[in-house]
Image (tube, rainbow, N blue to C red):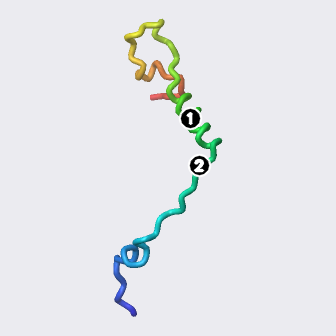
Amino acid sequence: ELGEATTRFVDEFMSDWQPPVQELPTEALIAVAIGDLLSRTVVQHNGGDPDADIYSAWAKSDSFRI
């Protein structure tokens, strides 16, 4: 009926719904691991100084720009 709409649709009709469980392909896991490894790569512009700030924008090998 008109005017009887509520915001409880999900609670009433979909409370038991769960998304289907799917395993990720091995290739996807490998790609994520490689991407994570590459994102952590640091160019050594510090002359080998172990106390240098590895989180400095100047020490990154990505295309960061200000």
Q: Is residue 38 above or below residue 25?
A: above
Q: Secondary structure at mark 2?
A: loop
Query: Residue at 39% across / 91% down in the picture?
Result: 2
Q: Nearer the viewer, mark 1 or mark 2?
A: 2
Q: Residue at x 48, y 28 (%)?
A: 65
**Kind of residue at badge 1:** Ala
Horizontally, residue 63 falls left or right of residue 55, namely: right
Q: Which mark is residue 33?
A: 1
Q: Position of residue 11 (x, y in %)?
A: 36, 74
Residue 7 position within the rendered picture, expressed as x and y whole percent measured from the top left: 34, 76
Q: Amino acid at mark 2?
A: Leu
**Where residue 54 sits in the image (x, y, percent)?**
42, 19
Looking at the rendered structure, which numbered label has been put on residue 24? 2
Q: Is residue 14 left or right of residue 23?
A: left
Task: Tell me what residue is drawn at x 65 percent, y 41 percent.
Answer: 27
Query: 10 Å neighbourhood of mark 2: few (<14), some, or many (≥20)?
Result: few
- Looking at the image, residue 8 lies above or below residue 22: below
Near-viewer residue (15 or 10): 15
Between 52 and 24, the one lying in front of the other is: 24
Few, some or many C-alpha atoms within 10 Å of disc 1 (few <14, some 14-19, many ≥20)? few
For marks 1 and 2 on the same chain, the one whose residue lies earlier in the sequence: 2
Q: Distance between the Cα atoms at labels 1 and 2? A: 13 Å
Please tell me which residue lies in front, 22 or 10: 22
Quadrant including the N terminus? bottom left
- Is 5 positioned to the left or the right of 60 in the image? left
